Image (tube, rainbow, N blue to C red):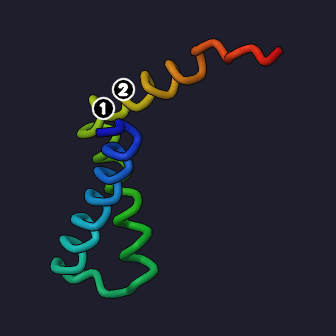
Amino acid sequence: MHPVLVYTASRIGLFIVTLGVLYLLGLQNPLVLILVAFLISGVASYVLLSKQRDAMSARISDKIDRPKPQDD
């Protein structure tokens, strides 16, 4: 599977799980709930998704470094 899709889906999934846990813990204000979930999932993804992030950056780097075809 494409590393960018895996990383993006993992980030979204982690955000949704964090949002659900915070809601179950009693955080009811929607704005505060989203902001806190965003911050916690961001820190958690930095730690938990390092392998996926490295694979994604390698894939993007390979695409950038690939020589472009010459049109005559």
Q: Is residue 46 above or below residue 42?
A: above
Mark 1 residue element: helix
Q: Quadrant of the N terminus?
A: top left
Q: Residue at x 40, y 73 (%)?
A: 34
- Amino acid type for the residue under numbered disc 1: Ser
As drawn, the residue found furthest toward the right would be 72
Residue 46 screen position, x and y as percent: 34, 39
Residue at x 38% of width, y 86% of height: 29
Across and down, in percent, residue 25 comes to 17, 77
Residue 19 position by quadrant = bottom left
Furthest toward the front, the residue is 72
Q: CA distance from mark 2 to mark 1?
A: 6 Å
Viewer-nearest of labels 2 and 1? 2
**Taking 9 as reference, is 58 above or below it?**
above
Q: Position of residue 50 (x, y in %)?
A: 30, 32
The three-letter code of the residue at mark 2 reads Asp
Q: Position of residue 68 (x, y in %)?
A: 67, 17
Q: Quadrant of the C terminus?
A: top right
**Vertical comparison of 41 with 23: above or below:** above
Q: Residue at x 18, y 71 (%)?
A: 21
| Residue depicted at x 26% and y 57% | 14
Residue at which label 2 appears: 54
Task: Say which residue label 1 marks.
Answer: 50
Q: Are marks 2 and 1 in contact (CB under 8 Å)?
A: yes
Frontmost residue, 52 versus 42: 52
Q: Judging from the image, what secondary structure is the residue with disc 2 in?
A: helix
Report whether 35 appears left or right of 67: left
Q: Quadrant of residue 15?
A: bottom left
